[in-house]
Amino acid sequence: MLKIILSRTGKKKQAYFKVLVTQKEKDPWGKYLENLGNYNPRSKELKLNADRVKYWLSQGAEPSATIWNILVDKGMVEGKKKKVTLISKKRAAKIADKKKKNEPAPAAEAPKAE
């Protein structure tokens, strides 16, 4: 199965990404089938070969969630954005408990003196 992914390059704390087509099981820093472009997250600059991206999508290559969101932003594909971060059920339960504790209690109505 083919996958379109981001492969990080660049210096420490100066991320720069290559957009690659590779086998899903392969290492993202190893050999790849084709380099489709690059992405600089600091300046939000994206250089993609749109024709080749559309070709690989037509061949069944599956984009990662981040690549999918970038393609939706650029209008290359249509659809909804995907969630990129995953929260475990245990962590979601902790967050919900914390929200319940921080919510103010509903104010009880005091009896009115007539």
Image (cartoon, helix red, strand yellow):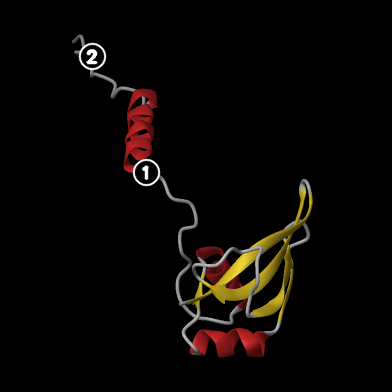
**2 or 1: mark nearer the eye:** 1
Quarter holding residue 4: bottom right
User: 103 above or below 69?
Assistant: above
Q: Residue at x 65, y 66 (%)?
A: 30
Secondary element at tag 2:
loop
**Residue occupying the point 59% across, 80% down:** 75
**Image location (x, y in percent) of residue 49:** 70, 84
> Where the N terminus falls, by quadrant?
bottom left
Amino acid tagged 2: Ala
In the rendered structure, the answer to whether residue 18 lies left or right of residue 84 reads right
Q: Which residue is mark 1?
A: 88
Identify whether 17 is placed above or below 12.
below
Q: Which of the labelled discs sits on residue 10, or is there none?
A: none
109 over 3 or under it: above or below? above
Distance Cα–Cα, label 2 vs label 1: 42 Å
Place of residue 16 in the rendered image (x, y in percent of width and height, measured from the top left):
75, 60
| Residue ID for mark 2 | 110
Q: Which residue: 64% across, 75% down?
A: 32
